[in-house]
Image (cartoon, rainbow, N blue to C red):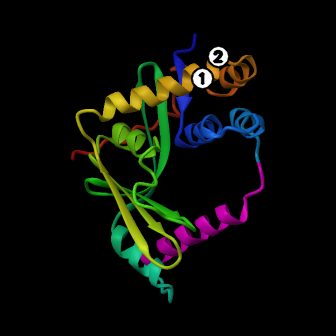
Amino acid sequence: MTDGFLITPSLYSAWRYWADSEDAGKEAIMDALNKVQKERTPAMRAGIGFENAVRFVCGGGASEDFCVLEAAERVTGGMWQQRVSRELGGDLVYGIADVIRRNTIFDIKLAFKYETGKYEGSIQHLIYMYATGIPNFEYVVSDGREVYAESYRWGEKSLETLRGRISEMKASLLSDDEMRRAFQTHWTYGKDACAGREIILRQNA
């Protein structure tokens, strides 16, 4: 018997893009629901390259890229690629944190255009703070010219916001027969099915 669904930032992001796009077809969200493996786009490869360069510098390597050096300075000394998860109302929220250092989770991003509050509508920081119990989250964002810090802190309404965003996504996916079937097939979470695979990271704030 299942208990709910696996909820990840990438799934929410794919759904949110589809839900907010007036003329978007269902192909992209269906690919996400069906976990279709796709070739990485140039933007994705650039983002991965930037993150790898930052990690290289944090490990003692050198770089002539000012943005890489500044981003590395913000996250150095942290633990990289930490899997985090925690149950929430029968669902399992799950993700992989780029860097965790003391009482802050960091996510490194390369964005070709950045505006203040770019990630406010994201579910990522809410999932990671809830899953770990760590109260601070910081997006470290480079546009190739500067490095920006977009910070969030767990507050009294954070859990309500997280629940609301998950509930909205689930209601939308389950209201469409095609999306519901894919969601139930590929994103079902059950305690027995996930035994031994669920890793919960806990740190005191």
Q: Left or right of 125: which side holds 44?
A: right
Task: Give the residue pinned by disc 2.
Answer: 175
Tell me residue 196's x, y (percent): 51, 31
Instruction: Residue at the far bottom: name it.
Output: 64
The residue tagged with tag 2: helix, strand or loop?
loop
Q: Main secondary structure of the magenta part?
A: helix
Q: Mark 1 to mark 2: distance in Å?
A: 5 Å
Do the numbered discs 1 and 2 sit on residues whose CB atoms are within 8 Å? yes
Q: Nearer the viewer, residue 194 or 48?
A: 48
Would you call the spot at circle 2 few (<14 residues within 10 Å), some (14-19), or many (20 or more)? Answer: few
Tell me residue 167's x, y (percent): 48, 23
Tell me which residue sits at (35%, 75%) in the image.
73
Residue 32 visible in image: yes
The residue tagged with tag 1: helix, strand or loop?
helix
Residue flagged by tag 2: what amino acid is it? Ser
Tell me which residue sits at (58%, 38%) in the image.
16
Tell me residue 75's x, y (percent): 36, 67
Q: Number of marks in the image?
A: 2
Instruction: State the extent of the magenta-drawn residues as a range.
Output: 38-58
Task: Give the residue pinned by disc 1.
Answer: 172
Tell me which residue sits at (60%, 38%) in the image.
20
